[in-house]
Image: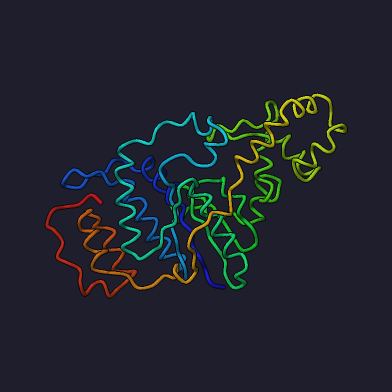
Amino acid sequence: MKKLILIDGHAIIHRAFHAIQPLNTSSGELVNAVFGFTSMLLNVLEIEKPDYIAVTFDKKGATFRHHADETYKATRSKCPDELVMQIKRVYEIVRSFNIPIFAQAGFEADDMLGSIVERVKSEEDLKTIIVSGDRDLLQLVNEKVSLHDLNGGYRKSIQFTPTEVEAKYGLPAKLIPDFKGLVGDSSDNIAGVIGIGPKNASELLQKYGNLEGVYANIEEIKPTTREKLIAGKDSAFHSRMMATIRRDAQFDWSLEACKLSDFDREKVIQLFDELEFYSLSKRLEKLFPKLMEIIKPKPTQTSLF
């Protein structure tokens, strides 16, 4: 089977920014998030050797979830300026490798990933690997889609297939939104049902199949749990909607446009030199030996990265 890699750019940038100590070029430009993202990208190219690859990002501004619930992500702190200023550089890196970027106003990067997965589901000879640090994406996992949850770098990532998702949550991946409808998600300020924890939620969904099944059989559930479910019914269905990744974003799509192909080697090397990613340039040489022909002489100063 051929392989499509989908990179959750938004999640990877944030993870890199918080995981890597501040790195500055000799001109003072902060590049730790750019460095972490680029290192991860090279790992993906080296380890996975994908046939197709794409990156998704959030767009600035409110999404349909914010319009549906003004408290959505209200508890999150503002994105640091030190990170915002690096996003443009990450875009430059991605584009220098001729990798397409998908982002659309009103949708999150997750929804772009879900919509791509929906677009390729009929491709019989294609398997998809989503690279992220966001387990909200577990709901997209199926027999042809896996999630690499980054944990200390790509080489240490946890691969979630349908088997791993069920082992972790006791539920199939498609029921992750129903699970969050009951337990909520504090990181996104999604309420769920007050008093219903992960163990109880998992047991209910195992027995009744989904939220509709739980409420259709509400009278046979023990009284203390039943009271909580009845009181939180509206919240349960609203929370499930908020936690569900959309798969219907409309955008120009072509699998062929995501084919990993040749790129402007000189532009990549120039960008790496500008960012002073000398160690990553050496990895590029191993990945793409022909780069040796155009690599410029390295500056004499010692680089920490």
Q: Residue 213, located in which quarter of the rendered image?
A: top right
Q: Which quadrant is home to the N terminus? A: bottom right
- Side of 181 relative to 128 (left or right): right
Drawn side of residue 95 relative to residue 118, left or right:
left
Q: Residue at image x 73%, y 31%?
A: 233
User: What residue appears at the point 26 percent right and 71 percent down from the top-left corner?
Assistant: 291
Q: Residue at x 57, y 36 (%)?
A: 68
Of residues 296 and 252, the one nearer the viewer is 252
Position of 169 with respect to 90 (left or right) is: right
Residue 123: percent from left, percent from top: 60, 70
Image-quadrant location for residue 84: top left
Image coords of residue 107 (percent x, y): 50, 47
Image x and y of residue 131, in percent:
49, 55
Of the pair 145 and 258, the residue shown nearer to us: 258
In the rendered image of this protein, does residue 42 appear above or below residue 207? below
- Colour mode? rainbow
Q: What's the residue at 31%, 41% (across, down)?
A: 21
Q: Position of residue 278 (x, y in %)?
A: 23, 58
Front residue of 126 and 95 = 95
In the picture, residue 176 is in which quadrant?
top right
